[in-house]
Amino acid sequence: MTGLRKLSFDAVVIGGGGAGMRASLQMAQSGFKTACLTKVFPTRSHTVSAQGGITCAIASADPNDDWRWHMYDTVKGSDYIGDQDAIEYMCSVGPEAVFELEHMGLPFSRFENGRIYQRPFGGQSKDYGAGGQAARTCAAADRTGHALLHTLYQANLKNNTTFLNEWFAVDLVRNQDGVVVGVIAIEIETGEVVFVESKATVLATGGAGRIYASTTNAHINTGDGIGMALRAGYAVQDIEMWQFHPTGIYGAGTLVTEGCRGEGGYLINKDGERFMERYAPNAKDLAGRDVVARSMMTEILEGRGCGENGDHVYLKLDHLGKDILHSRLPGITELSKTFAHVDPVNAPIPVVPTCHYMMGGIPTNVNGQAITQIKGKDQVIPGLYACGEAACVSVHGANRLGGNSLLDLVVFGRAAGIFIEEQLQQGIDYRLASEDDVDRAMGRLNALDSNDNGEDTAVLKRELQTCMQNYFGVFRDGEYMKKGRDELNTMRDRVANIAISDKSKAFNTARMEALELQNLFEVAEATAIAADERTESRGAHSRNDYPERDDKNWLCHSMYHPETKKLTKRDVNFKPKTVDTFEPKVRTY
Amino acid sequence: MLVSVYRYNPETDREPYMQDVEVSLPEGKDLMVLDVLNLIKEKDQSLSYRRSCREGVCGSDGVNMNGKNGLACITPVSEVVSRGKLVVRPLPGLPVVRDLVVDMGVFYKQYQRIKPYLQNSTPAGGRERLQSPEDRAKLDGLYECILCACCSTSCPSFWWNPEKFVGPSGLLQAYRFLADTRDEATEERLADLDDPFSVFRCRGIMNCVSVCPKGLNPTKAIGHIRDMLLSRAT
């Protein structure tokens, strides 16, 4: 080991978004030496951009609401490949986790009776689909993610969590027994490389929406945790499942919350027709996101799109009136003016389906323990945990419902924290990393720093994003995906051969962006192969050449193995503990 | 368009300098300042700045543009460019780490100092604490702060006394908790602020109000704290 500084913790959480900070809070509260290592100051994490709310059966809008109805909706939304034990856990523990947030100070909007405000969101129902639209999404105006993220940061400050702010995690360190014992990280301000040793390493690194050219995701969403896991040889699950949010602002990609439609807004085509009535007669604009996104694309492809090029549709909100828009959707009003030059009080917002969320990720159990598959059998990866968007526990399956991401990250950030807390109390013993172990994890960084003549990050990034956008979007097709895979194949060596001209240490963002691009590439390649191999249409994965859902062959998770670049199948959990199984049905809204 | 951007790399530059870069902008499209920085960085990767959400909610990219603080990602070039030139500098008053990246340490320290978390020791029971919509509305204009530091770094009182004057952002947050009907630490919070510097160094210059990218009004919040401190003293 070439004289690296070493820092030691009981637990290190990589990522300072909602999931990471909920996990670190749990462990800090119990007094363990916990670090939250994050490449941006925590409140700059992408959770901050979540708008509409956190879906949870707290029985405020409807005193008779039931978490089982929420579970039913989530299972159906997932197109039946969400794990029912995990969904059961999320929906039943949810209310407790949401009330905790309120007690920490989250400034939820309120009903007249003083309880937390809840609004309708897509895919929500009462009474297992028989009771009509539910209003189950708890909101702080349309800034719920911001309110949640700041509240969690504040709670961590109160509980003295150690923050390693603006530290970039490079790769996992494993000892000779295959136990994950920490991570190599760069302190961005000084450029110093440090071995952060830990008894538990939690990947809470969020999504990777930047593999696409058009995305609602922040610049920082580069799949760093997925990249680290894949490079370590671990499999990722359902990585072909990418959500395209129906309403990204046309041209800019910034998100317009589903809450707009929850509050009564709707989509129209160039003829002013409310076209969702044709595609989803019951739920209309509040059908599942995959359904709405496909309907919009169909309108556009069949020549009913809006604008000069007919390449978007409109979200109509003006009929809601100024008061509702300003009190319940103030952030949207602001964003629309800035990025679409439209005031929704007077005119509709131009929108188009935009990459939004990665349903797949690092497979975990409900305790946050990362899982890999060895000879077809589940195996816990010792020392490694994951939660939030980086993880695939899996509660979202093939399509996530709006408002379920915030619930996922607080419930499973908390669950991972609770489990690690117990493990630490019982005592965790492992062999320390040797110099060789650390050197191995330094390989990628050393290669980048010693390369003087190679590829340019910005050029490659553009090529990668264009390829993914063209061949792996809302509608997919075997022939095109094959082309995409070929392009990615030729890109792999080039991505490994990136050279940075600036090798200085202090706040070198060129080095970071090169490392991020390599992570993006790992995610993109996994996505491409898994998408091509899953020969059916399910949830967000929609193929022209295989238009039907194929329960006989594909009612299962996909597992992508980086070393063989092959896909295997993994059973979906159909055994919730306290309720009957929700059997797969045809999914209509 | 000519862009003049502040450069400083502590490893290679003895002192900071302004670098002029000619950037060709796409026609018919009003780019944001962040887009322009991204274009420059594609050609010269050594330029460092912070960025994340690119939609004005994360607060990463507070910079000074033609003399005024704001977020690069939601500031259209046309709004700040002057005589065909865009001048981008780091936020004033904080030590520069590199190029447009400043050391926000003292700013965060002032935020932490006001104990920015709800304090309530009464058991809440199994559900949420109730709050009327009217009481909740008292937090509007306060909780939306994104900690970008545009306000505090435009405040002369903060430039002079960054260690002692909490600054507009920290005080806005202080009032966010004073105004929250669920918080029980009003007296302790006021006692912590009751000295000649923490609050009373605000001279009502209102630079904070004119630069806040979220349209918030720290001066007004500071006025409320002053009133609370004064009525507590009498």
Image: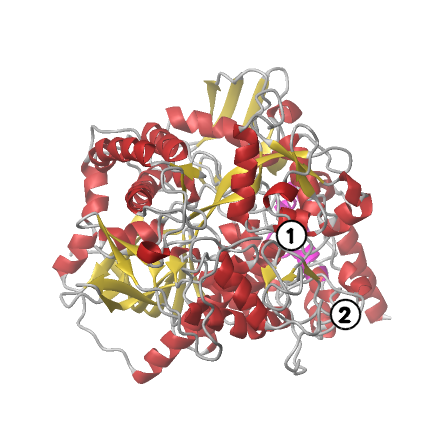
Q: Chain of mark 2?
A: A
> What segment is highlighted magenta in the picture?
B151-175
Depth check: A229 or B95 in front?
A229
The image quarter in which residue A85 lies: bottom left
Around disc 2, counting alpha carbons within 10 Å, would you say few (fewer than 14), some (14 to 19), or many (20 or more)?
some
Q: Answer whether residue B118 is magenta in the image.
A: no
**On the picture, is A338 further left or further right than A506?**
right
Q: CA distance from mark 2 to mark 1?
A: 31 Å
Mark 1 secondary-structure assignment: loop
Q: Position of residue A186 (x, y in %)?
A: 32, 50
Q: Position of residue A36 (x, y in %)?
A: 41, 62
* Residue on which disc 2 sits: A114
**On the picture, is B216 further left or further right than A552?**
right
Circle nearer the viewer, 2 or 1: 1
The image quarter in which residue B229 lies: bottom right
Asked if A198 appears above or below A536 in the picture, the reply is: below
Asked if A546 appears above or below A556 in the picture, the reply is: above
Pointer 2 and pointer 1 on the same chain:
yes
| The disc label shown at residue A256, or none | none
* Amino acid of disc 2: Gly
Q: Position of residue B231 (x, y in %)?
A: 85, 67
The residue that appears at 68% across and 74% down in the rendered structure is A64
Quick one: label 2 or label 1, which is nearer the N terminus?
2
Around disc 1, counting alpha carbons within 10 Å, would you say few (fewer than 14), some (14 to 19), or many (20 or more)?
some
The image quarter in which residue A470 lies: top left
Residue B204 in view in this figure: yes
| The disc label shown at residue A282, or none | 1
* Amino acid of disc 1: Asn
